[in-house]
Structure formats: C-alpha cells, structure tokens
Amino acid sequence: MAANRLKILKKVGKKSAAQRGFSLAEVLAALIIGSMVLVAVLAIYSRAENSAAAVTRKIEGSALPGEILQRIAEDLDRIIASDPSTKITIDSTRFDQGYQTAQLAIRKTFFDGKNQEQILEEIVWQASYSSDANCLTLYRSHSGLALEDKLLDEKRGSWEKAYPFIPISAGLTFFKVQVPRGQDFQDRWTSPALPPGVTVTISFAEATPTIKGTLDVPDEAKVTRTIAIDRTRKIGFEIAQTGAAEKQVP
C-alpha cells in the first residue's frame, strides 16, 4: 500500500510540474522581444506614412497653384478676347503683415447715353492677410452689368452685394503679379494700353523673415506662370526664303 501511494504521489507531482506556467524571467523576456518587434513595426509604418504624406503634399502643392493660375488666365482670355479695349491695372507693391501680396483688376467699360463711363464687367484678384490662419487668403470679385459668372452659382447676385470678394483659397504665403519688360519685371501697371503679358507668382510654402523685415518663401517653392495678353492677335513674321546660291541636295 505504501509503495502504491508513493507511485501515485510521484505521478501527481510530475503532472503538476508539467502544468506549471511560465516563470517571471520567461514572461519578461517575451515582453521585451514583443516590445522590440512592435517598436520596429511602428517605426516602419511611421516612415511610410510620412513618405506618403510628403508625396501627397507635393502633388497637392503643385496642383492647387496650377488651378488658380489657370483660372486667372481664363479670366484674362475671356474678357480681353471679347473686347480688346479692356483695361488692366496691377499693383504688386503691397505687403500685408509682412506677406507679399498684389491686386490684379480686369475692367471692361462703356459710355452710356450721357457720355459717362460705366463698368460693364470687372474682375479683381487680390490676396489679404487672414488672422485666423496667419497667412494670406486669395479673393476674387466679379461685378458690373455683365453678371453672368460660371464660377459661382445662379444665386451669386443676391449675396455678392454684401460680400463682393469671394474667398478662393486660403493658406497662401506669396502672391505677386507683374508685367514682363524685357529681362526685368514691372510691379505696377496703370497704362490704358494692355500690357504685353502678365506674370503671376504664388506659393503655399512656409514663409521666413527677411533682412527687410518682410516674409518670403524660397524661389524653388514659388509657382509662376506668364500669361500672354490677346493671344489671338496676328503675329508678323516672314518665312525665310532659301538662298538662290544654295545648292540643292539631289
């Protein structure tokens, strides 16, 4: 009997030893290894997410300025093509809270029966500082007797009287409009004659202080487009004639 009991106790001891849990050292080792793997996975995910965000910002950063410049070019083409006597005024000598800003006005006028000049259509593009975003907001205004404007809905006329300038895009840090003059640029244009072209430069990059006390962005972060005025005009050119003394190749 005693021998049988001893055998039974040995079997129970072996079973309890086999069913024993992990030791504290084993648990700590597993936690450390698991933490290292998790940290590595999170670091790879963070790098991939930052890379994807950088690519997205680069794509959007070039797409939005291009869309804005295209809209300005369409305004210039549409009004000037319909009436070459349209006047353009440009003022890029402005700074608002240190940011470079400008105003581009496209104005078409006519004289009524009393020989008084009236505005038939006027479109104004300008950027102003927004304290909420601590940067510039680009605005567009369309007024005059010709109120049809595809950019806005059909109810535009009722509420635009109270808010003539419609915000187009926020987050600008640079907005400049110039007239190309040979190798240089002119920041102001008030002549009744149309300029040969208009150069518009915008940027959404972070601005940094300059030694003049203003804010500026790197040149590589600026998006520029030169828009020719009256592209439908006839261009005088001559086709070069082949010299009579030139030998013909058989």
Image (tube, rainbow, N blue to C red):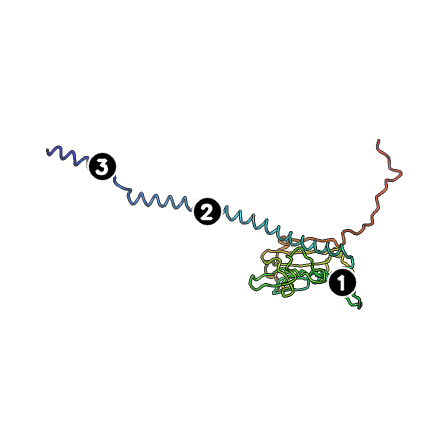
Residue type beneath disc 3:
Lys
Residue type beneath disc 2:
Ala
State the residue position of label 1. 109
Residue 46's x, y, as percent?
48, 48
State the residue position of label 2. 43
Quarter holding the N terminus is top left
Quarter holding the C terminus is top right
Q: Distance between the residues labelled 3 and 2?
A: 44 Å
Return the mark for residue 15: 3
Dot 2: element: helix
Q: Which of 232 and 23 is in front in this view?
A: 232
Image depth: mark 3 or mark 1 in front? 1
Residue 74's x, y, as percent?
70, 53
Return the mark for residue 155: none
Quick one: label 3 or label 1, which is nearer the N terminus?
3
Residue 143: name its quadrant. Answer: bottom right
Dot 3: element: helix
Dot 1: element: strand
